[in-house]
């Protein structure tokens, strides 16, 4: 039970008398009417914000359906992502295996090329050493040939001198023979 009446008086009094007291005082009556209008406006505002109960139930059912659809879509997306991840991991493993195979082949080819280059370098070094030995031998032979040529020039000069001396001697002998033959 309410302890005070609408006009603020204590209960257990006559309601008709209380009503007449409120109506008889226009300021109190206007204030009570203003309070009633404000309370009604506040109530209407709350009801309009909440909306009709049927709309709330429909929105709740729609939200439940959308939540289930979103949950199903999330599960499907997770399954698809897992499948794509597995496919990507398988493809990456295949590419990695192929790359390792190619790298191993390239390494073998590179090692063979390096060995071939080492062999070619060794052969070139041997050929260079042989060429240097031949060059040194050719230098020795050239010096010997120059010495021999100098000796031959000297011997040729001596031979020419000897030839000239022999020709002179022959001419002298011939002249002496002629002189002897003429003197006979």
Image (tube, rainbow, N blue to C red):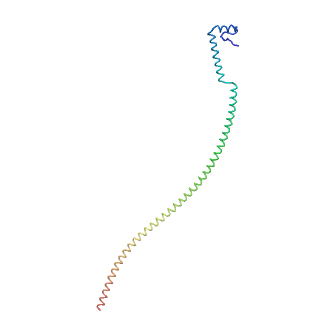
- Give the image quarter of residue 116: bottom right
Instruction: Give percent across and percent down for residue 109.
Output: 57, 56
In the displayed structure, 20 sits above or below 119; it is above
All told, the count of numbered labels is 0
In the displayed structure, 105 sits above or below 146; it is above
Given residues 96 and 125, the one toward you in this image is: 96
Return the residue found at the far bottom: 184
* Quadrant of the image containing the N terminus: top right
Instruction: Give percent across and percent down for residue 161.
Output: 34, 78
In the displayed structure, 75 sits above or below 184; it is above
Q: Is residue 155 left or right of residue 65?
A: left
- Give the image quarter of residue 155: bottom left
* Quadrant of the image containing the C terminus: bottom left
Q: Is residue 180 left or right of residue 92?
A: left
Given residues 52 and 100, the one toward you in this image is: 52
Q: Is residue 32 left or right of residue 146?
A: right
Instruction: Give percent across and percent down for residue 81.
Output: 65, 41
Given residues 184 and 134, the one toward you in this image is: 184
Given residues 76 and 117, the one toward you in this image is: 76
């Amino acid at each position: 039970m309410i302890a005070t009446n609408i006009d603020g008086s204590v209960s257990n009094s006559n309601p008709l008398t209380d009503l007449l007291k409120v109506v008889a005082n226009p300021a109190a009556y206007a204030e009570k009417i203003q309070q009633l209008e404000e309370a009604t406006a506040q109530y209407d505002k709350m009801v309009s914000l909440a909306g009709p109960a049927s709309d709330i139930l429909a929105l709740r059912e729609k939200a439940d359906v959308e939540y289930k659809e979103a949950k199903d879509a999330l599960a499907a997306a997770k399954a698809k992502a897992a499948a794509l991840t597995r496919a990507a991991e398988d493809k990456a493993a295949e590419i990695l295996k192929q790359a390792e195979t190619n790298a191993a082949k390239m390494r073998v080819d590179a090692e063979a090329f390096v060995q071939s280059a080492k062999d070619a370098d060794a052969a070139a070094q041997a050929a260079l050493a042989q060429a240097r030995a031949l060059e040194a031998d050719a230098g020795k032979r050239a010096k010997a040939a120059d010495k021999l040529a100098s000796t031959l020039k000297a011997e040729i000069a001596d031979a020419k001198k000897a030839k000239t001396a022999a020709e002179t001697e022959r001419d002298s002998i011939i002249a002496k023979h002629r002189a002897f033959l003429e003197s006979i």
